[in-house]
Image (spheres, grey):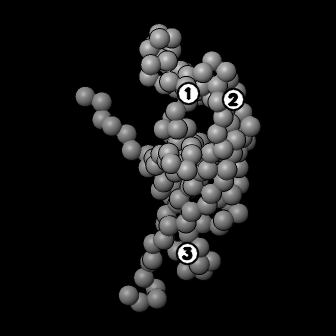
Amino acid sequence: MSPRSARLARLSRSVTFSACHRLHSKSLSDEENLKLFGKCNNPNGHGHNYKVVVTVRGEIDPVSGMVMNLTDLKECMQAAIMEPLDHKNLDRDVPYFSEVVSTTENVAVFIWDSLQKLLPQGILYKVEVHETEQNVVVYKGEETIVK
């Protein structure tokens, strides 16, 4: 490959935030919620120290040598993740979760959608949300087709 050929790369950055939530679906009875979510359905909620890894992808700019300026990515992550979610009760403080169960899957979708509004079109590749060291959700923007 010649030096002028476009090279693709992925760039990742991580942040951590603390938040509490309660796993509870308005579509289920209290008994069904308790059976489905167990101790995570505690009416007082529970907290996590979430780690989020955001990956963007694109061509390496021949002038800057970057896929994206890390300072710009950091600012987008601050606005899309830290400001709305850090030290918040997800169910009470984040309007999105008033109608959506605050599972880690839905946290990943919320972050993806928030970043999509701030990042250059087509650059966002993956959002990883680590709820614990053992539990990780990866979301790449895929949607199922409703039949």
Q: Return the x and y of residue 42 as percentages of the image width and height.
A: 60, 21
In the picture as drawn, the residue positioned furthest to the bottom comes out as 2
- In the foreground, 11 or 51: 51
Q: In this view, does 40 lie to the left or right of 36?
A: right
Q: Is residue 36 left or right of residue 13?
A: left
Q: Return the x and y of residue 135 as percentages of the image width and height.
A: 50, 45
- In the foreground, 119 or 33: 33
Q: Return the x and y of residue 96 as percentages of the image width and height.
A: 59, 28
Tell me what residue is drawn at x 60 percent, y 25 percent. 22
Three-letter amino acid code at the position of disc 1: Cys
Instruction: Check disc 1 and report the residue beneath it.
Output: 40
- In the foreground, 79 or 36: 36
Earlier residue among tags 1 and 3 = 1
Query: How far apart are labels 1 and 2 at the CA level?
Result: 14 Å
Q: Which label sits in the foreground, 1 or 3?
A: 1
Tell me what residue is drawn at x 50 percent, y 48 percent. 134
Tell me what residue is drawn at x 48 percent, y 38 percent. 105
Q: Residues within 10 Å of mark 2 (few under 14, many from 20)?
A: some
Tell me what residue is drawn at x 60 percent, y 66 percent. 68
Q: Mark on residue 61?
A: 3
Query: How far apart are labels 1 and 3 at the CA level?
Result: 46 Å
Q: Return the x and y of residue 121 as percentages of the image width and height.
A: 51, 53
Vertical arrangement, residue 70 with respect to residue 1, above or below = above
Instruction: Check disc 2 and report the residue beneath it.
Output: 89
Query: Mark 2: which secondary structure?
Result: strand
In what quadrant of the picture does the N terminus appear? bottom left
Query: Mark 3: which secondary structure?
Result: loop
Q: How crowded is mark 3: few (under 14 residues within 10 Å), some or many (20 or more)?
A: few
Query: How far apart are labels 3 and 2 at the CA level?
Result: 40 Å
Query: Mark 1: which secondary structure?
Result: helix
Earlier residue among tags 3 and 2 = 3
Earlier residue among tags 1 and 2 = 1
